[in-house]
Amino acid sequence: MNKINEAQKAVDSWIKEHGVRYFDPLTNMAQLTEEVGEVARIIARRFGEQSEKESDKSKDLGEELADVIFVVLCLANQTGIDLQSAFDKKLDLKSKRDHDRHHKNEKLK
Protein backbone atom coordinates (compact mmCIF):
# COMPACT_ATOMS: atom_id res chain seq x y z
CA MET A 1 0.00 0.00 0.00
CA ASN A 2 1.43 3.39 -1.00
CA LYS A 3 -1.27 5.72 0.22
CA ILE A 4 1.12 7.76 2.35
CA ASN A 5 3.40 8.35 -0.65
CA GLU A 6 0.38 9.52 -2.62
CA ALA A 7 -0.58 11.87 0.21
CA GLN A 8 2.97 13.27 0.34
CA LYS A 9 2.82 13.96 -3.41
CA ALA A 10 -0.62 15.58 -3.08
CA VAL A 11 0.65 17.89 -0.33
CA ASP A 12 3.74 18.78 -2.37
CA SER A 13 1.54 19.62 -5.37
CA TRP A 14 -0.72 21.75 -3.18
CA ILE A 15 2.24 23.63 -1.74
CA LYS A 16 3.60 24.34 -5.22
CA GLU A 17 0.21 25.44 -6.55
CA HIS A 18 -1.27 27.29 -3.57
CA GLY A 19 1.32 27.67 -0.86
CA VAL A 20 4.21 29.29 -2.77
CA ARG A 21 6.76 27.32 -0.69
CA TYR A 22 7.06 25.25 2.45
CA PHE A 23 7.39 27.09 5.73
CA ASP A 24 10.77 26.32 7.30
CA PRO A 25 10.86 23.17 9.46
CA LEU A 26 10.81 25.10 12.74
CA THR A 27 7.71 27.03 11.68
CA ASN A 28 6.05 23.78 10.63
CA MET A 29 7.00 22.20 13.96
CA ALA A 30 5.30 25.09 15.76
CA GLN A 31 2.30 24.68 13.45
CA LEU A 32 2.17 20.95 14.23
CA THR A 33 2.22 21.70 17.95
CA GLU A 34 -0.66 24.14 17.50
CA GLU A 35 -2.71 21.61 15.51
CA VAL A 36 -2.08 18.82 18.04
CA GLY A 37 -3.22 21.25 20.74
CA GLU A 38 -6.48 21.79 18.88
CA VAL A 39 -7.01 18.02 18.73
CA ALA A 40 -6.23 17.73 22.44
CA ARG A 41 -8.70 20.49 23.30
CA ILE A 42 -11.54 18.77 21.42
CA ILE A 43 -10.79 15.36 22.93
CA ALA A 44 -10.36 16.73 26.47
CA ARG A 45 -13.66 18.57 26.32
CA ARG A 46 -15.72 16.14 24.26
CA PHE A 47 -14.48 12.84 25.70
CA GLY A 48 -12.77 13.91 28.94
CA GLU A 49 -14.04 15.47 32.11
CA GLN A 50 -13.87 19.10 31.06
CA SER A 51 -17.07 20.73 29.90
CA GLU A 52 -17.21 21.70 26.26
CA LYS A 53 -17.56 25.38 25.53
CA GLU A 54 -20.35 26.40 23.19
CA SER A 55 -17.75 27.76 20.74
CA ASP A 56 -16.00 24.35 20.60
CA LYS A 57 -19.10 22.24 19.90
CA SER A 58 -18.98 22.92 16.18
CA LYS A 59 -15.30 21.98 15.83
CA ASP A 60 -14.72 18.95 13.63
CA LEU A 61 -12.28 16.45 15.17
CA GLY A 62 -11.69 14.84 11.78
CA GLU A 63 -10.73 18.17 10.26
CA GLU A 64 -8.31 18.88 13.10
CA LEU A 65 -6.73 15.43 12.76
CA ALA A 66 -6.37 16.08 9.02
CA ASP A 67 -4.55 19.34 9.85
CA VAL A 68 -2.07 17.31 11.92
CA ILE A 69 -1.53 14.86 9.05
CA PHE A 70 -1.07 17.70 6.56
CA VAL A 71 1.69 19.33 8.62
CA VAL A 72 3.38 15.97 9.27
CA LEU A 73 3.40 15.35 5.52
CA CYS A 74 4.92 18.81 4.97
CA LEU A 75 7.67 18.05 7.47
CA ALA A 76 8.37 14.69 5.83
CA ASN A 77 8.53 16.27 2.37
CA GLN A 78 10.83 19.09 3.32
CA THR A 79 13.21 16.85 5.26
CA GLY A 80 13.38 14.15 2.59
CA ILE A 81 11.60 11.45 4.57
CA ASP A 82 9.79 8.66 2.72
CA LEU A 83 7.02 8.44 5.28
CA GLN A 84 5.52 5.32 3.70
CA SER A 85 8.78 3.45 4.17
CA ALA A 86 9.23 4.81 7.70
CA PHE A 87 5.64 3.86 8.61
CA ASP A 88 5.98 0.36 7.13
CA LYS A 89 9.19 -0.21 9.13
CA LYS A 90 7.55 1.06 12.31
CA LEU A 91 4.47 -1.13 11.87
CA ASP A 92 6.69 -4.17 11.25
CA LEU A 93 8.76 -3.38 14.35
CA LYS A 94 5.69 -2.87 16.52
CA SER A 95 4.11 -6.07 15.18
CA LYS A 96 7.16 -8.11 16.12
CA ARG A 97 7.97 -6.35 19.39
CA ASP A 98 4.43 -5.98 20.71
CA HIS A 99 2.79 -9.13 19.32
CA ASP A 100 2.06 -10.64 22.74
CA ARG A 101 2.73 -7.65 24.95
CA HIS A 102 -0.75 -6.13 24.85
CA HIS A 103 -2.50 -9.50 25.08
CA LYS A 104 -0.62 -10.17 28.33
CA ASN A 105 -1.41 -6.74 29.78
CA GLU A 106 -3.93 -7.30 32.57
CA LYS A 107 -4.91 -3.61 32.44
CA LEU A 108 -6.36 -4.12 28.97
CA LYS A 109 -8.64 -7.01 29.92
Image (tube, grey):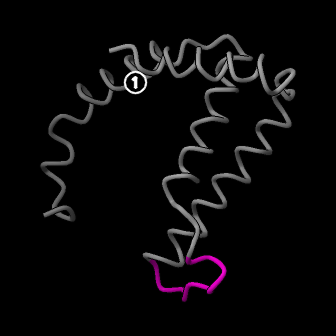
Q: Is residue 59 left or right of residue 27?
A: left
Q: As shown in the figure, which amino acid type bears the numbered disc 1?
A: Lys
What stretch of residues is rendered in magenta?
48-57
Q: Is residue 98 above or below residue 3?
A: below
**Which quadrant would residue 72 be assigned to in this image?**
top right
Give coordinates of residue 21: x percent, y percent: 85, 21
Q: Does residue 1 show up magenta in the picture?
A: no
Q: Nearer the viewer, residue 99 or 76?
A: 76
Q: Is residue 108 left or right of residue 61?
A: left
Residue annotated with mark 1 = 90
Q: Is residue 66 above or below residue 50?
A: above
**Which quadrant would residue 69 be assigned to in this image?**
top right
Residue reaching furthest to the front: 17
Q: Is residue 90 above or below residue 26?
A: above
Q: Is residue 93 left or right of residue 3?
A: left
Give coordinates of residue 53: x percent, y percent: 62, 86
Give coordinates of residue 3: x percent, y percent: 41, 20
